[in-house]
Amino acid sequence: MWQSELRELQLVLSDNIRTLRGKHGLSQERLALEAGVDRTLVSKIERTIANPTLEVLTKLAFVLGVPVTRLLKN
């Protein structure tokens, strides 16, 4: 079912953002500030509570120096 695929993508996205953020030495707050999004949104994405828009994913990917597709790959 699509719900299980969504859950898997949320987990992959969460892990990738957290890992890339760590590699860049960025706090959630700093990543959010540089991407122009709210810090609580970054926290919610990393905790798989929020589903970001394509715009938000693009902003986060830009700051993290990767293509958007990299955020959704295992």
Image (cartoon, rainbow, N blue to C red):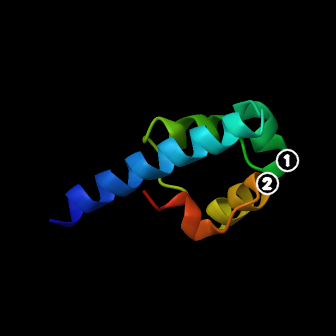
Quadrant the C terminus occupies: bottom left
Where residue 44 sits in the image (x, y, percent)? Answer: 53, 38
Where residue 64 sits in the image (x, y, percent)? Answer: 74, 52
Q: CA distance from mark 2 to mark 1?
A: 7 Å
Disc 2 on helix, strand or loop? Answer: helix
Where residue 58 sits in the image (x, y, percent)? Answer: 68, 66
Residue behind mark 1:
34
Residue extending farthest to the right is 34
Q: Viewer-proximal residue, 10 or 71?
A: 71
Please give the name of the residue rendered at 21% of the width and 56% of the height, measured from the top-left corner. 4
How packed mark 1 is, by other alpha carbons closer than 10 Å (few <14, some 14-19, many 20 or more), is: some
Residue 27 appears in the figure: yes
Residue behind mark 2:
63
Please give the name of the residue rendered at 65% of the width and 44% of the height, measured from the top-left corner. 20
Q: Earlier in the sequence, mark 2 or mark 1?
A: 1
Please give the name of the residue rendered at 56% of the width and 69% of the height, measured from the top-left corner. 69
Q: Amino acid at mark 2?
A: Val
